[in-house]
Amino acid sequence: MALSFKFKFARISWRDAWATLIPVALLVVLALWITLKFVQPAPPDTIIIASGPEGSSFASFAQRYQKILARQGVKLRIVPSEGSLDNLKRLADPKHAVDIGFVAGGLAGQVEGSAELDSLGSIFYAPVYVFYRAPKPLQRLSALEGRRIALGREGSGTHVLAAALLRANGVDEKNSKFVELDGKAAADALLKKEVDAAFLAGDSAAFATIRDLIRTDGIRLFDFNQGEAYVKRFRYLTRLDLPPGTLDLGKNLPPETLTLLAPTVELVARESLHPALSDMLIEAAREVHGRSTLFQKAGEFPAPLEHEYRISDDAQRYYKSGKTFAYRHFPFWVASLIDRIVVVVVPLMVILIPAFNIVPRLYRWRVIQRVYRRYAELMALERAAFNDPDRKERAELLRRLDKLEEAVIKLRLPGSFADQVYLLRNHIGFVRARLSQASAQ
């Protein structure tokens, strides 16, 4: 018995569409959430640097950094300190609001938590100058035993290095008088004969102070003629030679080659420093410290020389490939925005592009599956028809067959799948014809 129904084909099967799109949409939302969770936030417009005492070389360098960063719209706030050791303590202590600082070598073991800090690279040598009063040049630091020695303020890298060098020569507070003076105060005390020797370095003294002492009669600059031995013992030190006339050609100062010792100063930062600011700081360091000086060649600094602190991943990337395209060609804030958009968009595109290809196929598969499920019922009816059913069983099979066809006709499928529906109806007709023939026999 044939059935007559009005066919209704939809343009789209919304049930199958939603069932297809919802999982993909959830996947996209999950990818977006993960991306936003781990993407770097926008770089701050203010960072803080721990420099050194007012008037020191460290303080002077910090001011130059400040002007360079200002050109990019970033404010560098300078926090004066006692020097390298004080800078390191502030960086290692989360209670202090400091992002970066100048730190001379030889101090990592002095501060707990310093291993968690990163280095943006070595930026310059910081020679230690030992001035003293004596009728003849001293050959060993041990000759300072029993004298009054200005070795820098507590908290400065000068103080730590001077104490280490003196101890290595058997000079300590038990047999000598240590005076905590640095910079110009130490130089004035030496000039006034209030101390017999003074240790000066960049984190506590300006170069002008050092230059004036070199030109002062009666005051000598110590020659580390055991320089190689010191470098072997103190691995963070570098030997530097000062040829005759280097400081003053007219007066031929120094009159003969002097050997100095110098730790390397690093630009140390917290791990939380934003990558964009890391690039900017290295750029500033290149502008400030990249030129040739008495103790370095042009382009020697900054350099990714790993001493006591791990070179940060961002710094390593910068030294290998430089700034990213956006930061090379756009203003800082525009580049930062582009950088963040790229970080969000690229992962989404990796998911969306395959999704645009998969969704239509998945949708088609779901719709066709609704037709194919009816084929399973039809095959069961056909198998029953081959088992020589009696009249009553054939009538029941025809009834079930009509019901199956009615269900197929009522399927709301897109018009593009009409061929599948009509093909199934043809197959239903084939099974019905077989049952009808058996009934006629």
Image (cartoon, rainbow, N blue to C red):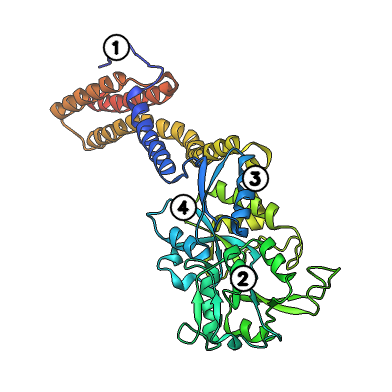
Q: Which mark is residue 192?
A: 2
Whichever of callouts 2 and 1 sits on the residue coming sooner in the sequence is 1
Between residue 94 and residue 35, name the one nearer to us: 94
Relative image position of residue 347 (x, y in whole percent): 49, 42
Q: Amino acid at mark 3?
A: Ile
Asked whether disc 2 touches disc 1, contact meaning CB atoms under 8 Å apart, the reply is: no
Q: Give the residue pinned by disc 3.
A: 68
Q: Measure the C-alpha gap from mark 4 to mark 3.
A: 19 Å
User: Helix, strand or loop at disc 4?
Assistant: loop
Q: Is residue 440 visible?
A: no
Relative image position of residue 313 (x, y in whole percent): 54, 58
Q: Measure the C-alpha gap from mark 2 to mark 1.
A: 121 Å
Whichever of callouts 1 and 3 sits on the residue coming sooner in the sequence is 1
Q: How many marks?
A: 4
Question: For the N terminus, which image quadrant?
Answer: top left
Relative image position of residue 151 (x, y in whole percent): 54, 73
Q: Measure the C-alpha gap from mark 1 to mark 4.
A: 83 Å
- Drawn side of residue 297 relative to residue 318, left or right: right
Q: Nearer the viewer, mark 2 or mark 3?
A: 2
Q: Give the residue pinned by disc 1.
A: 4
User: Where is 4 relative to 342, above or below?
Assistant: above
Q: Nearer the viewer, mark 1 or mark 4?
A: 4
Between residue 300 and residue 23, name the one nearer to us: 300
Q: Which mark is residue 98?
A: 4
Mark 4 Cα shell of 10 Å, populated few (<14), some (14-19), many (≥20): many
Q: Residue at x 33, y 20 (%)?
A: 412
Whichever of callouts 4 and 3 sits on the residue coming sooner in the sequence is 3
Q: Which mark is residue 406?
A: none
Q: Measure the C-alpha gap from mark 2 to mark 4.
A: 38 Å
User: Which residue occupies the extreme left position in the image?
Assistant: 392
